[in-house]
Amino acid sequence: MFRVTIAVRCDDIDANGHVRGPAYLAYADHARWACLQAAGIDPAGLTARRIGPVNLETTVRFHRELPPYGEVDVSCDFRWGTGKTSRVTQEFHAPDGTLAASVSSVSGLLDLDRRRLLPDPGAYWRELAARPELLGLGPKTA
């Protein structure tokens, strides 16, 4: 499972001293892209192939308050099925290890010309990734 540490910025805090809801979504997006890059996927390569990831559904569950002005560890756990979508579960942990929030997303891989989801997105990611195991796809075989 991939993890990244993100600094909580001052503009992520609302007037009540809480991390704003949209900041959690931005942290989730950042962590997913960081995971793709760590797996060896170049965003420019996606564009050149005329494909791109799309988020179809997102659910945020808040568990505990995230301390402002600190850091948050965000994980990415990808789950692949047999259709056109995949699921990503992300957990947000405060520096003391407390689970602050979780985000669950349904994603797909879009053909940018036809504007349709591609079948079996995991196969595309496996082909593109140098380290597909970071995406829950297992290591490449020769």
Image (cartoon, helix red, strand yellow):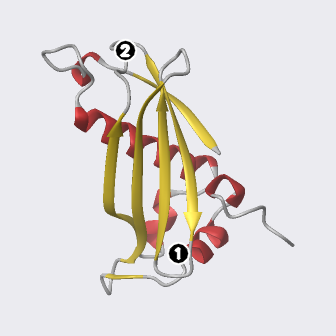
User: Amino acid type of disc 2?
Assistant: Pro
- The residue at the point 51 percent across, 65 percent down is 45
Report the side of 82 relative to 31 (left or right): right
- Where does the image place residue 138, in percent across and percent down from the top left? 74, 62
Q: Label 2: which residue? A: 67
Query: Residue 121 bears which disc, if any?
Result: 1
Amino acid of disc 1: Pro
Identify the secondary structure beneath mark 1. Answer: helix
Q: Nearer the viewer, residue 123 or 95?
A: 95
Disc 2/disc 1 C-alpha distance (Å): 36 Å
Q: Residue at x 32, y 87 (%)?
A: 114
Examine the rendered structure and indicate whether residue 129 appears above or below residue 19: below
* Residue 127 vertical position relative to residue 129 in the rendered view, above or below: below
Q: Is residue 138 left or right of residue 118?
A: right
Is 126 placed above or below 19 here?
below
The quadrant of the picture occupied by the C terminus is bottom right
